[in-house]
Image (tube, rainbow, N blue to C red):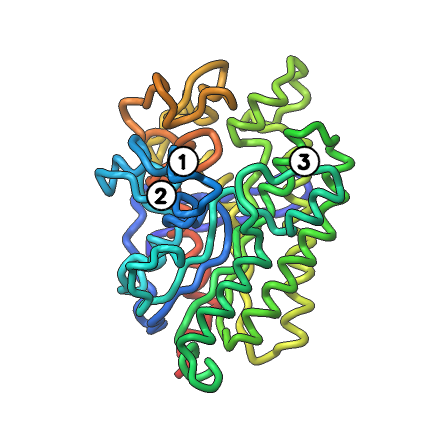
């Protein structure tokens, strides 16, 4: 895999240098025969559009979603593939079906991720005066669905069946923070959610281990301050509020705080389960790498913070007229954009992030497990 990383980590700098030509890599030597996914829209391959709450009319169920790779909408909140799709391909597996597709087969695993899902149960969010307006399928609900799935396929326990499986616990948590911020909570108030959000994810890791998982990847969250949805909502004339990539510093600091606390939680779980391989997936660093290497990766450097599919304002995004809505245009060259719809990324951006993740997995996942 032709990815060369030079990483310098301190409180102010992350540098990742990607080779201009990134080779297709694979996880076949890990011999994964099943992938299991928990999470939100970054990973949803079609659950949300099958929920009664979406009424079957979610924009994810119609073009232009899916247009670039699938040539039709699949329920994925992108113009093409997601990270889990790239992981499946790299593992030599078919794409993992959404759990709510009752007509699908789940021989290669199951995907419980649901767009708009939160790490915290909606009741907990409501107690904090934060609403989850789109779905009630939070992380605990997904874990319950996973438990029911394993009960239906495992005669006694799942240890033997799952020994060659890879579990993706997240990314999840971004919606908890986004809903809080968009509903008027301050950065300080939103920051107070981190302890509870991280604990919910930590409990999720423990639960999948109880189910029989022996290899687990737990991704962190993207830099919130780089997403068009937040750049639009919190736009300011104060140049000091932005970093070198024109991302909002205070929101990125929130992301970093979540990610640092999540890594501490992962270390705690590792101590309790020394025979389980648990890896942190650094989605934050991967996203920053796209910005740093945008020109060489042939993203349009003039549109790095703009949505491809969207309308309005400096960042081509409006909460009132989102991608998929009537009259909302799509850019002519989605492969030159990092952001697809102002919230979710493009097929190409997800591909590069997946390659960075796979490179990290190959070096740490202990693929010699029988």
The quadrant of the rendering that contains the N terminus is bottom left
Please tell me which residue lies in front, 140 or 350.
140
Please tell me which residue lies in front, 174 or 262.
174
Give the mark nearest the N terminus, 2 or 1: 1
Mark 1 near mark 3, Cβ–Cβ under 8 Å?
no
Residue drawn at x 39%, y 83% as measured from the top left: 370
Residue drawn at x 42%, y 17% as measured from the top left: 311
Mark 2 near mark 1, Cβ–Cβ under 8 Å?
yes
- Residue 47: % across, % down: 41, 50
Foreground disc of the pair 2, 1: 1
Please tell me which residue lies in front, 2 or 345.
345
Residue 80 in the image: above or below residue 5: above
- What residue did someone put label 2 on? 75
Q: Secondary structure at mark 3?
A: helix
Q: Secondary structure at mark 1?
A: loop
**Could one spot residue 292 in this view of the protein?**
no
* Residue 131 horizontal side relative to residue 370, left or right: right
Mark 2 near mark 3, Cβ–Cβ under 8 Å?
no
Foreground disc of the pair 1, 3: 1
Give the mark nearest the N terminus, 1 or 3: 1
Residue drawn at x 51%, y 39% as measured from the top left: 288
Farthest left residue in view: 71
Q: Which mark identifies residue 180?
A: 3
Please tell me which residue lies in front, 350 or 197.
197
- Residue 226: % across, % down: 54, 31
Q: Secondary structure at mark 2?
A: loop
Give the mark nearest the N terminus, 2 or 3: 2
Q: Which mark identifies residue 271?
A: none
Q: Which mark identifies residue 58?
A: 1
- Residue 345: % across, % down: 42, 37
């Amino acid at each position: 895999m032709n990815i060369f990383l030079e990483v310098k980590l301190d409180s102010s700098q992350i540098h990742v240098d990607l080779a201009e030509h990134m080779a297709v890599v694979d996880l076949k030597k890990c011999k994964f025969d099943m992938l299991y996914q928990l999470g939100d829209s970054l990973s949803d391959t079609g659950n949300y559009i099958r929920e009664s709450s979406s009424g079957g009319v979610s924009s994810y169920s119609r073009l232009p979603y899916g247009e670039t790779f699938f040539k039709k909408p699949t329920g994925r909140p992108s113009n093409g593939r997601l990270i889990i799709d790239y992981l499946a391909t790299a593992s030599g597996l078919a794409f993992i079906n959404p759990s709510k597709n009752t007509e699908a087969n789940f021989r290669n695993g199951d995907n419980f991720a649901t767009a708009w899902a939160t790490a915290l149960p909606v009741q907990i969010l409501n107690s904090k005066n934060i609403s989850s307006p789109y779905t009630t399928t939070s992380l605990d609900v997904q874990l319950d669905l996973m438990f029911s799935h394993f009960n239906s396929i495992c005669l006694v326990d799942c240890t033997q069946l799952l020994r060659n499986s890879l579990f993706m616990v997240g990314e999840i948590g971004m919606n908890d923070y986004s809903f809080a911020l968009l509903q008027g909570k301050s950065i300080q108030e939103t920051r107070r959610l981190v302890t509870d959000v991280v604990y919910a994810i930590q409990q999720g890791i423990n639960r999948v281990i109880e189910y029989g998982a022996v290899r687990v990847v737990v991704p962190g969250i993207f830099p919130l301050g780089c997403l068009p949805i937040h750049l639009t909502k919190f736009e300011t004339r104060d140049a000091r509020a932005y970093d070198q990539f024109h991302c909002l510093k205070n929101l990125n600091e929130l992301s970093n705080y979540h990610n640092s606390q999540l890594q501490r939680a992962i270390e705690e779980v590792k101590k309790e389960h020394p025979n389980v391989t648990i890896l942190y997936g650094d989605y934050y660093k991967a996203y920053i790498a796209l910005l740093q290497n945008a020109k060489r990766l042939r993203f349009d450097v003039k549109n790095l913070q703009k949505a491809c599919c969207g309308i309005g304002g400096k960042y081509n995004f409006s909460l009132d007229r989102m991608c998929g809505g009537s009259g909302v245009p799509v850019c002519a060259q989605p492969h030159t954009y990092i952001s697809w719809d102002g919230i979710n990324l493009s097929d190409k951006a997800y591909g590069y992030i997946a390659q960075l993740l796979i490179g990290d997995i190959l070096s740490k996942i202990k693929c010699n497990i029988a």
